[in-house]
Amino acid sequence: MPDGQYLDPEIETADLARVRELQDARLGKQLDYLFARSPFYQEKFEAAGIRREHLRSLADLVRVPFTTKEELRESQAASPPLGRHMAAEMAAVIRIHASTGTTGQPSLVGVTRRDAEIWTRVTARSFYTQGIRPTDIVMHGASLTLFAGGLPVKDALEHLGATFVPVGTGASEKLVMIARTLGANALHCTPSYAAYLADHVRREARMDPRELGFKKIVCGAEPGAGIPAVRARLEQAWGARVTEGLGNADMIPIIFAECPNQSGMHYNGQEYVYIEIIEPESGEVLPIESGVSGELVYTSLERECVPLVRFRTRDRVNILGTSCRCGRTGFKLRCVGRTDDMLILLGVNVFPSAVKDVVSSFSPRTTGEMQILLDEPGPGVRPPLKVVAEFGEPGADLAVLRREVESKIRAVLSVSSAVELVPPGTLPRFEMKGRLVRKLYEG
Ligand SMILES: [Zn+2]
């Protein structure tokens, strides 16, 4: 039973040169496999004039064109069930998941037994990094469906020896009842649900959420728990430490996770996924150092069913550090949103999560709930940015509050805004991922 500071100390605290060596060796094997078994990459490499001998180490990867989600969709549509990027026999596949946030045909992802073991290993390492231990009782306030934040989380939490309680969403009353009976001390869910549940507990159970006794809240699937003012609000409401994780259904469900120092999510899957950060427009590879902002790109180092090379995630991240008091050597980042979420006002880039941070920072004068209204498709937005936010306290001087929020948005984000304040409870609450933007043009 693990009880130290790390689940896999050898890799989590490994010297970076040693990690690189290990990754180079694993990339070689993965490429041999791809050249032999993946019709998708055989064609892609051929089209780019790349032969196996051209790719001798990680440094050569820059020659390989990126793989996009659109390509995977087309590959799957043209060659069912899992696409031409499937490199294993269907008989070897033990489970299917799907990536979320899509309309229409879901994008399916298969895992072999070996892939599943790796998912479990890295995801467990991530939860352990977040402070989950075998003695913890974890309420799972998310679904156990095709969603990669469901069953793989069950596997990981059971693997590390914690007690997993699959309540799901849409069952808040039951969750509260069972958590009390069990004396559960941890909650896994989206940050939207952690906020929703706190409201529910106050309103329906007429309890202070702190009385439930959650000490560890582990979040994922959307930015939120890493937005400073949102995190502060959740921690205040629950009396718990809130940390977040980040992964990708096409790669591994949780690859980055925050340690209790809460200073960004550590890169946690060194032996299985190689990371690049790129400038999204030019595709230029950026150095991994504090202050760098770009798009996350993943390359599988050991994957049987659907290995991917230079897969563009569309996740926009900021690098926060390359060392930590916890001793982990994996660099740290924060995800500010999807590249597609970004808005541009007179040349200034704005992520909705950053607006949420400003609005939440006025808590308790605001509830923290807000939505950006878009009259026409982005990313270009004609100023001012329209923001609807809930005020928190009745009787407050709303004209003053509105001006203060607008001026802080201008000071922090360098854009002008028009804030409309509405009563608490007006905006929709979400039990899975929240929606920070309302597209008026979609009706
Ligand atoms: Zn750390």
Image (spheres, grey):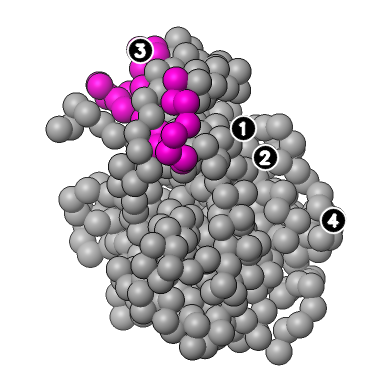
Q: Secondary structure at mark 4?
A: loop
Residue, x 63% and y 70% (percent of image)?
A: 215
Per the rendering, the mark at residue 293 is: 1
CA–CA distance in space, label 4 to label 3: 44 Å
Viewer-side residue, 171 vs 440: 171
| CB atoms of marks 2 and 1 within 8 Å | yes
Q: Secondary structure at mark 1?
A: strand
Q: Quadrant of the C terminus?
A: top left
Per the rendering, the mark at residue 319 is: 2
CA–CA distance in space, label 3 to label 1: 24 Å
Q: Position of residue 126 (x, y in %)?
A: 62, 66
Left or right of residue 314: residue 110: left
Left or right of residue 378: residue 443: left
Q: Nearer the viewer, mark 4 or mark 3?
A: 3
Type of amino acid under label 1: Ser
Q: Crowding at label 1, few (<14), some or many (≥20) Cα neighbours within 10 Å? A: many
Q: Nearer the viewer, mark 3 or mark 2?
A: 3
Q: Crowding at label 4, few (<14), some or many (≥20) Cα neighbours within 10 Å? A: few
Residue, x 72% and y 75% (percent of image)?
A: 7
> Mark 2 or mark 3, which is nearer the start of the sequence?
2
Q: Which range of residues does the magenta coloring cover?
A: 371-399
> Mark 3 or mark 4, which is nearer the start of the sequence?
4
Disc 4 C-beta below 8 A from ligand 1? yes
Residue at numbered disc 3: 382
Type of amino acid under label 4: Arg
Viewer-side residue, 256 vs 240: 240
Q: Nearer the viewer, mark 3 or mark 1?
A: 3
Per the rendering, the mark at residue 325 is: 4
Does 194 appear in magenta? no
Residue, x 75% and y 56% (percent of image)?
A: 261
Type of amino acid under label 2: Ile
